[in-house]
């Protein structure tokens, strides 16, 4: 009996072994299939078209380009402005099922449609949410739809509600919302827990101030993304794990991934403080009005940041990207001075299945059909678009 029991234990261990090994697969993306020769300033979003050509937005240069890797050509799409075929601040490129694209214009508070062959089309105005109470859709569109995380195979767009409650104070969680442009309807598909003091506001007769983003850097913060079938990957920092939300079913909670916190150094604190002072880092404070009669909105300088003693396993919403098929890529934090990014990759059951590293000073932009797009930054801080076969 004892021998039989031992054999069964060995058999169970053998069955479990492939799962443990697969969770430790490490892949390095070092040689791209394509790298576009022309450089860009700040690649913000990428969209692979059915033809294999690629749209990219550059928020700093305020431009959208159509890239043809095969021909080595680049063509500007639309132009800066507020008229037809124009945009003020080109941000997220949203994939639609007919091959077309919606460009999110943040300050313009609208979308520009782009045809499958890269030609600018009609303007799509921001939708008006229904009147409801609480921190629901009524409070979504402060400054227009923000924090867009993607679209599904039906063309429904996923984004966050406002971090401000009905009284103007911060809430403890924010709704994850889905906009169906065809019906049109809004649905709440989940919630994301917010860190303390994630947002605040103050209103006077002459101006309104809104502050977004916790001023204490490296505060553990949940992030999320959406797969092609509309499933939500909610990435939790403490304990570190991924939960998948799909319709009304119970969330699928992945196993906890062990994590050893990384100490925040004094050199890193100084670097981040300088970046915030120069306007390249930190949170945002928006002021509407100002007592001068000019109105409008402006960003003003935040106070110097405070810091956690250690880093969470990932840092912020930009750390999470989800493939159309439903893999969640999570950019891990690393020690100060380590310029080699590494992504944890989780499957649909929330299991950690692989680790993917990139070349130094590189980051994942998005995904196409079996592809992953990466921005590589050179020593002059210029960015280059790369395409790899997805591992």
Image: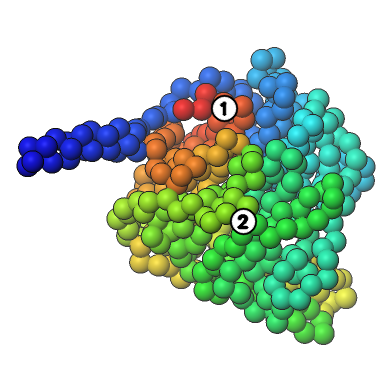
**Residue position marked by numbered label 1 in the rendering:** 371
Taking the image as drawn, is residue 195 in sight? yes
- In the image, is 349 to the left or to the right of 204? left
Check the image and report above or below for 200 versus 322: below
Residue positioned 46% across, 22% down in the render: 31
Q: Residues within 10 Å of mark 2 (few under 14, many from 20)?
A: few
Residue located farthest toward the top when viewing the structure as drawn:
71
**Residue position marked by numbered label 2 in the rendering:** 248
Residue located farthest toward the front when viewing the structure as drawn:
1
Front residue of 49/131: it is 131
Residue positioned 78% across, 50% down in the render: 180
Across and down, in percent, residue 310 comes to 35, 62
The residues tagged by marks 1 and 2 sit, at their Cα atoms, a distance apart of 31 Å
- In the image, is 142 to the left or to the right of 212? right
Residue positioned 38% across, 60% down in the render: 239
Check the image and report above or below for 220 versus 71: below
Front residue of 103/149: it is 149
- In the image, is 143 to the left or to the right of 42? right
User: Nearer the observer, disc 1 or disc 2?
Assistant: 2
Taking the image as drawn, is residue 77 in sight? no
Across and down, in percent, residue 232 comes to 58, 50
Front residue of 281/215: it is 215
Residue positioned 72% across, 24% down in the render: 50
First of labels 1, 2 by sequence position:
2
């Amino acid at each position: 009996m004892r021998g039989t029991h031992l054999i069964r234990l060995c058999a169970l261990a053998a069955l479990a072994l492939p799962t443990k090994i697969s969770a430790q697969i490490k892949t390095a993306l070092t040689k791209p299939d394509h790298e576009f020769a022309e450089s860009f300033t700040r690649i913000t979003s990428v969209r692979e078209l059915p033809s294999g050509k690629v749209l990219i937005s550059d928020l700093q240069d305020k431009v959208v380009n159509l890239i043809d890797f095969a021909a080595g050509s680049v063509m500007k799409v639309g132009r800066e402005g507020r008229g037809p075929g124009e945009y003020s601040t080109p941000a997220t490129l949203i994939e639609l099922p007919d091959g077309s694209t919606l460009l999110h214009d943040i300050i313009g508070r609208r979308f520009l449609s782009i045809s499958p062959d890269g030609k600018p089309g009609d303007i799509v105005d921001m939708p008006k949410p229904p009147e409801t109470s609480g921190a629901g859709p009524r409070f979504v569109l402060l400054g227009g739809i923000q924090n867009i995380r993607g679209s599904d195979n039906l063309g429904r767009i996923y984004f966050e509600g406002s971090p401000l409650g009905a009284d103007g104070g911060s809430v403890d969680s924010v709704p994850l919302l889905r906009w169906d442009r065809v019906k049109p309807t809004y649905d709440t598909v989940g919630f994301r827990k917010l860190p303390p003091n994630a947002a605040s506001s103050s209103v006077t007769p002459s101006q309104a101030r809104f502050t977004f983003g916790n001023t204490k850097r490296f505060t553990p913060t949940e992030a999320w993304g959406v797969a092609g079938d509309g499933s939500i990957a909610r990435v939790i920092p403490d304990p570190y794990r991924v939960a998948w939300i799909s319709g009304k079913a119970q969330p699928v909670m992945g196993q906890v991934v062990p994590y050893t916190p990384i100490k925040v150094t004094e050199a890193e604190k100084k670097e981040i403080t300088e970046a915030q002072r120069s306007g390249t880092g930190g949170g945002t404070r928006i002021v509407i009005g100002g007592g001068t009669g000019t109105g409008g909105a402006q960003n003003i300088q935040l106070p110097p940041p405070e810091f956690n003693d250690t880093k969470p396993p990932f840092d912020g919403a930009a750390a999470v990207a989800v493939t159309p098929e439903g893999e969640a890529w999570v950019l891990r934090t690393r020690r100060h001075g380590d310029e080699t990014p590494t992504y944890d990759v989780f499957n649909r059951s929330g299991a950690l299945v692989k680790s993917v590293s990139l070349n130094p000073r590189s980051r994942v932009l998005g995904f196409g059909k079996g592809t992953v797009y990466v921005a590589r930054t050179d020593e002059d801080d210029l960015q280059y678009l790369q395409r790899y076969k997805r591992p």
